[in-house]
Image (cartoon, rainbow, N blue to C red):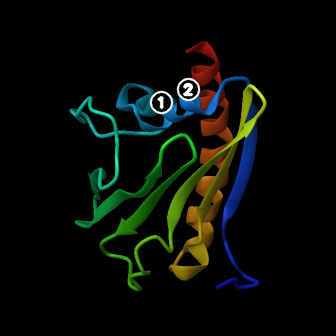
Amino acid sequence: MMHSNELTVKDEVLIEAPPSKVWEVLVKSKFVSKWDELPENYPEEDMALGSKVIWELPNGGQSITTIIKADQNKELIIALNVTNWEIQPKEGDVAYRYLLEERGSDTLLKIEIGDFSLIKNGQMYYDASVEFASDAKKVIKELAEDL
């Protein structure tokens, strides 16, 4: 459902590497830790369907990301849930989506994060995510092009 007040960050970057290399950077924890935060002692294994990252929040809640779709070399969707959000959106309504589109020998990576209009303080999450997407895409590009 699209709202006019939808708060979804959309960003993209053209990467001079095939989707398979971009995918590695998205799911191998040794690379993920370079463009996103991972808790200490996060296992080295590749992230896959059902993989969760759990953060304990200072206020006693938890921030949990769960991979709900992993279509290799094409699409990765990571649902975001914070246990003490007053309104709990359905799983996947607030998510990080990474879409990989082959462009010859390159990959167009599209990043969508949201929809934060579904939660309280959504604008704050949106603003932080604009910055995150902008920083993350540069690092993902560098890592994939160096593989």
| Residue at left offset 39%, top offset 82% | 88
Query: What kind of residue is marked 1?
Result: Glu
**Residue at x 78% of width, y 30% of height:** 104
Read off the residue under disc 1: 24
| Residue 142 location (% of width, % of height) | 64, 21
**CB within 8 Å, label 1 to label 2:** yes
Q: Which mark is residue 121?
A: none
| Residue 28 position by quadrant | top left
Q: Residues within 10 Å of mark 2 (few under 14, many from 20)?
A: many
The residue nearer to you, when weighing 71 against 132, is 71
Secondary structure under the numbered disc 2 in the rendered image: helix
Work out how far the residue at label 1 is from the one at label 2, CA to CA, in angstroms: 5 Å
Q: Is residue 12 left or right of residue 58?
A: right
User: Taking 41 as reference, is 15 left or right?
Assistant: right
Label total for image: 2
Which residue of the protein is positioned furthest toward the top in this rendering? 146
Residue 47 x/y as whole percent? 34, 41
Q: Is residue 119 above or below residue 70?
A: below
Dot 1 falls on a residue whose secondary structure is helix
115 and 22: which one is in front?
A: 22
Judging by the rendered image, the residue that carries numbered circle 2 is 21
Give amino acid for label 2: Lys
- The residue under the point 60% across, 28% down is 139
Q: Residues within 10 Å of mark 1 (few under 14, many from 20)?
A: many
Q: Quadrant of the N terminus?
A: bottom right
